[in-house]
Amino acid sequence: MKFFLDAVVLLAYFGVIVGIGLSQRKKNDSVEGYTLGDRQIAWWAVLASILAAEISAATFLGAPESGYTHRNWAYAQFAIGTILARIIVSFLFIPLFYRHGVISLYEYLETRFGGVTRRFASATFAITRVLAIGTRLYVAAIVVVLAWQLWKGPVAPEMQFLIFAVALTVISLLTAVYTMVGGIRAVIWTDFIQVSVLCAALVFTIFFLLSKLPEGWASAQAVIEHPVFFDFAKPDEPGLAAWIRNVLTADYTLWTAIIGITILTMSTHGIDQDTVQRMLTAKNRRQSAFATIMSGIVDLPVVSAFIFIGVLLYAYYLHHPDPTLPRAADGTLETRNVFPHFILTQMPAGLRGLVVAGIMATAMGSLSTALNALATSFARDFILYRTPDMEESRRIKILRWSTFGFAIAIIFVGVVTSYYVTYHPKTQIIPLVLGILGFTFGSLLGIFLVGIFFKTRGNDLGNVIAMVSGFVAVVFCSNAAIQTSVGIAEPLVLAFPWRIACGALVTILVSLCFKTPGHRVIATAAVPA
């Protein structure tokens, strides 16, 4: 009976979410209705959906982990780059996509370069997004594993992996059902509910933690480390070379926030079907741009609140030592599990259920968004373009079955990730998730930038070579062993926020070596109005 009230809260949450999703079925009588909501979604709902798409369970647990480990807001300085990038996206990419009337973003690349570029970019997005969302998915199951351990005691890695696999499979299938049936409207309106649950969970958690500290805010302030927010990456050694190396190899610095994260966010919010599809549901490009920029502004206090929870957790366990905190086999603390452990062992019934629902909300919100985007790009770029006369009902059926197929693929990746993390418990969440995007999204961004700014450069063959080159460059610059094998005595391993910048730069330079065919130059404009 200990978790009865929590179970009621969770069941009520799942019932509301699935019910809302299924209620949108009758509004999906066309492809544009299923994928873009007939472009009639209110800007505030679009804003909530963008937030739900980017605040995953990895953020819910990874940002507190960063706060607990670093005890400052260095991770939050990334908000500088995310806001700058959203402004660029709003004036560069959104008008372009509205003018071309695209449903899949990669339709623009066919107009600009050709079908090979479109489908290669779409396939790159699909593979990357499946891997990225699959690695996020296991995070939501962490709380389930810890709850089982509190109930049954310590479990062997094999059992822990099994719990991970079952939990993430159930979450994924529930999300896939309402996403398949309700389309983008189901995604957006459930996202709105999920963001509301998330914010409520954040507020209650912060006040509850503060109430448990002997001196409230003063107890938390005593453990905060410097730099509190801005890290200028000043190296211990003198000289420009040492400074540059420090900037490129450190995860959380001001220069990373201004340059690296701006470029990273341009890719995740400018050429990623997952996020941009939300933007294109707005009534016009102005409302879309407003929702996009506001999402960046709102994101700062949300992420800061997550980090603050991590700082408060450190202060709490400093004053209230807990020998049962999760530890790896070698005795080291599993920092990513501190917050879930606190939820399950210290929070009162009901509130505990609300916070767990918040974790599930972030997982289901980002998953539903990804499923709808993956189905849309795959169906539009690989199936539907071949049969322009196909009945609308059959097109929607293809979209729905594509959604289910990608759900299975994501579950597979989530299971593999769970297996890896079970036997490598020191793995950090944020670098793992964002690092995957860094290997390929730079290539995607580079091709779009060539298409927009260089109207006579780039073609199908050159773009494939350029994107592969960008990927290879990122792999090389992210792996010390590879650099050492070619004779580099002091390898320079790029921090994960710089990978997309590296991939984009190499892709652009290679693509510019190839000339655009004459009929493609005539068919497109260089820069959107």
Image (cartoon, helix red, strand yellow):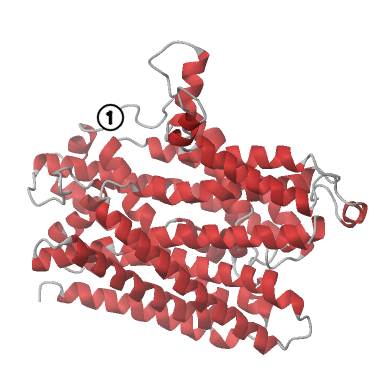
Q: Total number of numbered labels?
A: 1
Pick whichever, 479 or 85, lies toward us: 479
Say what secondary structure mark 1 lies in.
Answer: loop
Q: Position of residue 247 (x, y in %)?
A: 48, 27
Please give left or right for residue 191 compared with residue 307 in the image. right
From what the image shows, is residue 150 above or below residue 441? Answer: below
Q: Residue at x 58, y 57 (%)?
A: 291
Q: Residue at x 84, y 46 (%)?
A: 455
Question: Can residue 196 be seen in this snapshot?
Answer: no
Please give left or right for residue 518 compared with residue 315 in the image. right
From what the image shows, is residue 461 above or below residue 82? Answer: below
Mark 1 Cα-neighbour bin, 10 Å: few <14, some 14–19, many ≥20? some
The residue to which callout 1 is attached is 225
Q: Residue furthest top?
A: 238
Question: Can residue 34 be seen in this snapshot?
Answer: yes
Amino acid type, residue under disc 1 in the picture: Glu
Please give left or right for residue 202 compared with residue 458 in the image. left
Q: Position of residue 488 (x, y in %)?
A: 50, 25
Q: Quadrant of the N terminus?
A: bottom left
Q: Position of residue 40 (x, y in %)?
A: 65, 72
Q: Position of residue 529 (x, y in %)?
A: 81, 50
Task: Specify the quadrant of the image occupied by residue 506.
Answer: top right
